[in-house]
Image (tube, grey):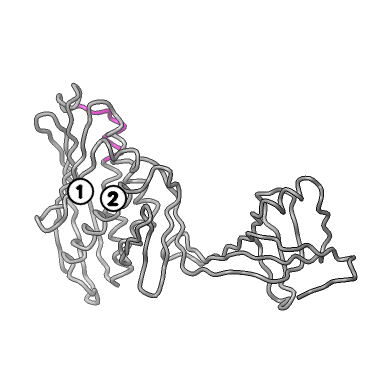
């Protein structure tokens, strides 16, 4: 049995009267403690899947204070009874520490207007766009960033910084080789905000002629279309062509089942989690022409 103990210290510091007296709202303290435990237990679950390890984890808590601060210590006990792990248990913990640090840095650098995290999967791995710059991710970093429990827990440990007088958060992940995680009051909004994510595994374009199977006059609803050249292929697509939607809303377009649309658009395949099922999304960006079913003079290119 391979056993390890890691000590993770979270430390809030500030100039406020309450924090100087080592005081913080009970709800913030309990939420932060729970959040810190969730971050590491979930990170080990992701690492177990990626590295084919079987590490069990248990977290125990102790706490204290220094001048102008409040802190608590989580002792993380890990056990590995299997032999097929690709890393030593301590190396897996090191990979988790580095991945968590990178995840928090990415979230800190995202613009506040970014409400959806878009991760793209390619032949070379994973990447994310941060203010026009492409940042490469390894598999563990991608798994942690797309884990909703971890992102919610990061929000929980950052929430105390919204209180007056609490100015910084530091997470010491143990040994010197593990990166120190720091969050300042200026970072708080970008970490507290709850973002959705989209993990794109493939993308491309759609074009051609499609029969209308089901339609909607609601601009936010999707249409079911059947490929004219391959009737076995159907797709459910969102139409975003503003000119076409305006004609529809002004009752300038009337539709029947089996009307024909010539369209251009895009598609992408996504997963809600790295380990989840793949879903294909279709968006029609331009409706080139609409041919009613009763029109007998079809001129199809």
- Residue 130 in the image: state x and y as whole percent: 36, 54
In the displayed structure image, the side of residue 287 where residue 76 appears, left or right: left
Contact, CB < 8 Å: mark 1 with mark 2? yes
- Residue 154 in the image: state x and y as whole percent: 31, 46
Q: Which is nearer the eye, 58 or 233? A: 233
Give the mark nearer the N terminus: 1 vs 2. 2
Query: What residue is at 33 percent from the left and 43 percent from the top?
Result: 191
Q: Report the quarter where the N terminus lies.
A: bottom left
Q: Secondary structure at mark 1?
A: strand
- Residue 23 in the image: state x and y as whole percent: 20, 27
Q: Looking at the rendered structure, which numbered label has been put on residue 104?
A: 2
In the displayed structure image, the side of residue 90 where residue 160 appears, left or right: right
Residue range corresponding to the magenta coloring: 23-32
- Residue 190 in the image: state x and y as whole percent: 34, 42
Q: Report the quarter where the C terminus lies.
A: bottom right
Displayed quadrant of residue 263: bottom right
Displayed quadrant of residue 97: bottom left
Q: Which is nearer the eye, 220 or 131? A: 131
Query: What residue is at 15 percent from the left and 32 percent from the top?
Result: 69
Q: CA distance from mark 1 to mark 2?
A: 8 Å
Does the segment drawn in magenta span residue 31? yes
Query: What residue is at 64 percent from the left and 54 percent from the top?
Result: 240
In the displayed structure image, the side of residue 77 where residue 287 appears, left or right: right
Q: Looking at the rendered structure, which numbered label has been put on residue 102?
A: none
Return the residue at label 1.
Answer: 181
């Amino acid at each position: 049995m391979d056993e390890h103990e890691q000590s993770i210290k979270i430390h809030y510091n500030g100039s406020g009267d309450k924090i100087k007296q080592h005081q913080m709202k009970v709800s913030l303290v309990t939420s932060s403690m729970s959040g810190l435990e969730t971050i590491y237990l979930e990170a080990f679950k992701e690492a177990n899947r990626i590295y084919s390890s079987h590490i069990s984890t248990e977290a125990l808590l102790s706490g204290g204070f220094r001048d102008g601060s409040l802190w608590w210590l989580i002792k993380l006990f890990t056990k590995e009874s299997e032999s097929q792990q690709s890393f030593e248990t301590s190396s897996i913990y090191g990979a988790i520490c580095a991945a968590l640090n990178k995840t928090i840095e990415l979230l800190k650098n995202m613009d506040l207007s970014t409400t959806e995290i878009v991760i793209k999967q390619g032949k070379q791995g994973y990447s994310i766009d941060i203010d026009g710059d492409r940042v490469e991710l390894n598999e563990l970093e991608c798994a942690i960033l797309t884990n909703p429990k971890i992102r919610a827990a990061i929000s929980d440990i950052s929430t105390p910084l919204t209180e007056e007088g609490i100015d910084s958060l530091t997470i010491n992940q143990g040994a010197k080789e593990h990166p120190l995680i720091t969050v300042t009051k200026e970072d708080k909004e970008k970490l507290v905000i709850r973002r959705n994510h989209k993990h794109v595994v493939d993308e491309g374009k759609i074009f051609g002629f499609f029969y209308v199977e089901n339609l909607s006059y609601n601009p936010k609803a999707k249409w079911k279309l059947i490929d004219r050249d391959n009737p076995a292929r159907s797709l459910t697509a969102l139409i975003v062509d503003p000119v076409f939607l305006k004609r529809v809303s002004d009752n300038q377009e009337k539709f029947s089942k089996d009307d024909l649309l010539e369209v251009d658009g895009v598609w992408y395949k996504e997963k809600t989690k790295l380990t989840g099922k793949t879903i294909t999304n279709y968006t029609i960006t331009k409706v080139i022409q609409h041919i009613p079913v009763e029109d007998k003079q079809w001129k199809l290119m």
